[in-house]
Amino acid sequence: MPSTVEKCVKELLEKTGKGDLKPIKHLSTANKLQVFNVMFKEHETCSFFSKKIEKPAGFTILDILEDSGSSSAPETVSSKPINLHHYGGHDMQVAANVDVNRKLEVSASCETAEVQKFALQFQYTEIPKKTWTELLKRKLLEKEPSFLQQLRRKKANLYVVTAIMKLTKCTSLNAKENVKGEGKLSFPLISYLKGNFKGEGRKVPKDKMDLPEDTVIAYQRKQLVFKEDGWDILYYSTDDEEETFQDHFNLLQEEICNQMKALDSVPRKRRDTLFHSILAMLKDGEDFQNLMDLLKENCSGHLEGHGGTILNELQKNYEDPEAIPVHCILYLLEAIMVLTDIQHDLLAQSMERKILAQQRELVKSILQPNFKCARHIPFTLKPELLAALPDEELDITYGLLEECGLTMEPPNPRSTWDVEAKQPLCSLYGTLSLLQQLVDP
């Protein structure tokens, strides 16, 4: 979204006390964010661990509910049109001195003043609580629509737009710039060639945007969740407190298993090279991001260090029947990137001590029963899994879990589930699984 529009909307939300609304990011999708419309947040790549991006889904909550039998649309509440006038800006000063071999001297100063001027007339519309009470009485369609099935497969979280702020008049937003400058210049070797300069620029439009009537400029959305007994809107919860589709651990398990199977046919020697190169990167604190960027560009380019060893190994893949699946390595690196620097060090120690398999089973035992839980509940680690780890190895493992956000006190097997720990725990589980697969498929 153009910077002028974004600045105006942010100021508008601040002045009207609607800071819980989100400014629109792109004008092209603004009017797809009407109340009742569904949005979704999916992973940027196929990996469970990658960054999530938010988009309009192209349907409304009403499209997935049984017909109410009423011909009238669900009720919304709108404010009266509100006017906001703004005239403001900021100043900038620049000064420079140049000395080139004592033959040329220049000094200059410059001042710019950027001003923004706009008048907005807008209206706030929201879905009242009583409308939600009526909607929640309606059941989901007996047969899940294909578009919803596709979002389920994407592991997307869904949201319903519950409030919007839109323009009630066509509006032009302008930013203008005024420039002043002055200074002096001289050539010491040519005594008669000296001078001063001074100038002033006129105000000229720098940025202008025409916004038509009914343009949505900000919105609020609440998470949609599907449960065994129906559906609900998390009206008072924090963002992503639960998963929209409640079967995500099975999907995560399936996703990781598919990556592990893809590594089965890779020869032992090549797997060893990858394993020890990743170990060296973890120990030396090498940056994984540069390697990931080059792998996403079809393994092109050159890289120094242990990351370069991995890149070179993958560059041998062309027409190789025993090629290393690049998507598996990208998946592993994305999981590693979620972990902290402390976890990287602990992970390197775990790799050297050959305790990845035991740690993987321990992490799985935490995730599996708690994955759907959005509350803080106590849990106890399985004694047989702890018994497989000697004292020092147990300390390393507890350190990995603590860095995920769990409270661990060796040798105490008890802790409390925290929903904020789920994402790093998933990344740790994926990392341990694929690293162990490189050692012993």
Image (spheres, rainbow, N blue to C red):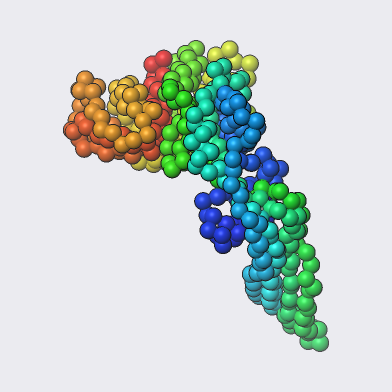
Residue at the image position 74 percent from the left and 66 percent from the top: 176
Q: Nearer the viewer, residue 288 or 58?
A: 58
Q: Nearer the viewer, residue 120 or 6?
A: 120
Quarter residue 277 falls in: top left
Visible in this render: residue 268?
Answer: yes
Q: Is residue 209 above or below residue 52?
A: below
> How many numbered discs sit on the rendered protein?
0
Residue at the image position 63 percent from the left and 16 percent from the top: 319
- Where does the image place residue 79, in percent across and percent down from the top left? 61, 53
Q: Nearer the viewer, residue 73 or 225?
A: 73
Quarter residue 34 falls in: top right
Point out the residue furthest to the right here.
Answer: 192
On the picture, is 173 further left or further right than 242? right
On the picture, is 403 further left or further right than 8? left
Residue at the image position 49 percent from the left and 29 percent from the top: 137
On the picture, is 15 further left or further right than 349? right
Residue at the image position 36 percent from the left and 30 percent from the top: 373
On the picture, is 153 further left or further right than 30? left
Q: Is residue 20 above or below residue 74?
A: below
Visible in this render: residue 309?
Answer: no
Quarter residue 250 falls in: top left
Q: Is residue 420 above or below residue 185?
A: above
Point out the residue furthest to the bottom here.
Answer: 192
- Where does the image place residue 339, in percent across and percent down from the top left? 41, 37
- Where does the image place residue 282, in percent across and percent down from the top left? 40, 36
- Where does the image place residue 78, in percent across and percent down from the top left? 61, 49
Quadrant of the image for the C terminus? top left
